[in-house]
Image (cartoon, rainbow, N blue to C red):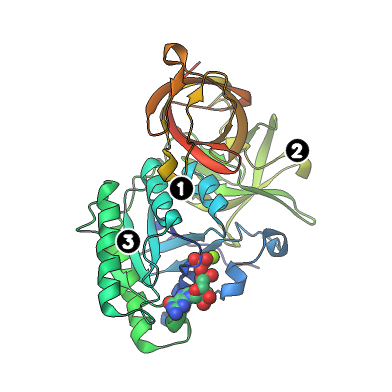
């Protein structure tokens, strides 16, 4: 029998972000190593974090890129998204539901395009607290590292993060992974900074239950399991839920977090829900599990949208009425038709109001964030203001 999850510490969701090859995965592995030595985590080696999804679907795996660990004061789910596209999908849509982020910047390379893009996107989706890991500090010289630190603080200030007060910790994921005491202490200092600088967010545990489906798995002999982060409310074994998108009403017959059964899951938890009598191919990423009757899927809405500038990786040409990009809403990826009304066009770098007609119904509500993507890149970020 599996050991049940006991909620003894506040739970937060954090993640590493930053340019490819700056050491996000190495640092993630190093954090689990350092905490496993303290006895509050299980070491997850680099190649177990960085592998492809297909290889990882064994038992109830929440998400390949998720690891869990505890510090003295908190329980964390930590997401290390493998590629840039995963950031855009999971972070920009808010699907990752990060309460805080560790921005990994290589002290050897400094700010690179994805460093800046992830900071911009984090700001857009309301990740209010960022701690900086100046990684590869083992290999850099102090003067250059000082310059990189200045540059990162400026970047954060430019995006409204208060770069002067953001903790910046010089680390070496690689050396900490090798057990070097100096760099082990540096990773501990980084975790202390996360513990103290990222506040515990407000959780809407009393709201009607809602969880966007991130992944669907089958467990032989048990049935279909959906995984994701609980956006709001509480769910327990025996609860009736609706799977919006699949048009299915069912009952939750099991709730687990990181392989441990739990009595009830609440807003902020990363969980796997076992659903009674649901065929595996009936449910997909992008569907939403919710308290029946609490939210109705719709396809037309008005939103405030920021069209990314070319400098931020966006378009070089304006967007017009009739434009049909992809909308990433929670975990869903849906085509939508843009109507700019009397404005007619929106230039890169501008904020506009648009009305969107989606290709299918999805649960929508004012305040919901989304990303606009086209040809594999993010071209806009918005917030729903009215649902029609
Ligand atoms: P990611 O793409 O951001 O996840 O980066 P990885 O963790 O895959 O690391 C990219 C490369 O940088 C690998 O070759 C690592 O061994 C190397 N690396 C990561 N962390 C450090 C570090 O602290 N010091 C040094 N010298 N190299 C590192
Ligand atoms: Mg990586």
Left or right of 349? Residue 226 is right
What is the spatial separation of the Cα atoms under label 2 and label 1, in whole angstroms?
A: 25 Å
Give the residue at the far bottom of this rendering: 180
Left or right of 151? Residue 254 is right
Give the residue at the far top of this rendering: 342
What is the spatial separation of the Cα atoms under label 1 and label 3, in whole angstroms?
A: 16 Å
Residue at (38, 46) in percent of width and height? 120
- Tell me residue 279's x, y (percent): 78, 41
Q: Residues within 10 Å of mark 3 (few under 14, many from 20)?
A: many
- Tell me residue 74's x, y (percent): 37, 64
Does 36 sit above or below residue 379?
Answer: below
- Tell me residue 62's x, y (percent): 60, 57
Asked if the residue under mark 3 is in contact with the one under mark 1, i.e. CB atoms within 8 Å, the reply is: no
Residue on which disc 3 sits: 131
Residue 268 visible at all: yes
- The label on residue 282 is 2
Asked if the residue under mark 3 is in contact with the one under mark 2, i.e. CB atoms within 8 Å, the reply is: no
User: Which is more N-terminal, label 3 or label 1?
Assistant: 1
For discs 2 and 3, the disc positioned in front in the rendered view = 3
Nearer to us in this view, 2 or 279? 279
Nearer to us in this view, 142 or 38? 142
Residue at (75, 38) in percent of width and height? 282
- The label on residue 97 is 1
Left or right of 116? Residue 165 is left
Helix, strand, or loop for circle 2? helix
Nearer to us in this view, 120 or 388? 120
């Amino acid at each position: 029998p599996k050991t049940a999850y006991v909620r003894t510490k506040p739970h937060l969701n954090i993640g590493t972000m930053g340019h490819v090859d700056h050491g996000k995965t190495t640092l993630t592995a190093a954090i689990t190593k350092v905490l496993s030595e303290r006895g509050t985590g299980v070491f997850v080696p680099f190649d177990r974090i960085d592998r492809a999804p297909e290889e990882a679907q064994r038992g109830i795996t929440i998400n390949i890129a998720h690891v869990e660990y505890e510090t003295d004061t908190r329980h964390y789910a930590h997401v290390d998204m493998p590629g840039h596209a995963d950031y855009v999908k999971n972070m920009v849509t808010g699907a990752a539901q990060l309460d805080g982020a560790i921005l990994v910047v290589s002290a050897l390379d400094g700010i690179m395009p994805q460093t800046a893009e992830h900071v911009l996107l984090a700001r857009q989706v309301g990740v209010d607290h960022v701690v900086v890991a100046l990684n590869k500090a083992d290999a850099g010289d102090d003067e250059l590292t000082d310059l990189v630190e200045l540059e990162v603080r400026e970047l954060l200030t430019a995006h409204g993060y208060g770069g002067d007060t953001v903790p910046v910790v010089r680390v070496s994921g690689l050396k900490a992974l090798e057990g070097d005491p100096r760099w082990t202490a540096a990773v501990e200092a980084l975790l202390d900074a996360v513990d103290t600088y990222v506040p515990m967010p407000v959780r809407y545990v009393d709201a009607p239950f809602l969880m966007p489906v991130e992944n669907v798995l089958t467990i032989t002999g048990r049935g279909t399991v959906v995984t994701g982060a609980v956006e709001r409310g509480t769910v327990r074994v025996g609860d009736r839920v609706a799977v919006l998108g699949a048009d299915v009403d069912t009952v939750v017959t099991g709730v687990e977090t990181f392989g441990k059964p739990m009595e009830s899951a609440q807003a902020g938890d990363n969980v796997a829900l076992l659903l009674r009598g649901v065929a595996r191919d009936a449910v997909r990423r992008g569907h939403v599990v919710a308290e029946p009757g609490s939210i109705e899927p719709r396809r037309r809405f008005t939103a405030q949208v920021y069209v990314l500038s070319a400098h931020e990786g966006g378009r070089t040409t304006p967007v017009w009425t009739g434009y049909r990009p992809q909308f990433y809403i929670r975990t869903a990826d849906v085509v939508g038709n843009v109507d700019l009304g009397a404005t007619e066009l929106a230039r890169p770098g501008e904020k506009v109001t648009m009305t969107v007609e989606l290709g299918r119904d999805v649960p929508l509500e004012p305040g919901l964030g989304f990303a606009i993507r086209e040809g594999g890149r993010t071209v806009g970020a918005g917030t729903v203001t009215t649902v029609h």
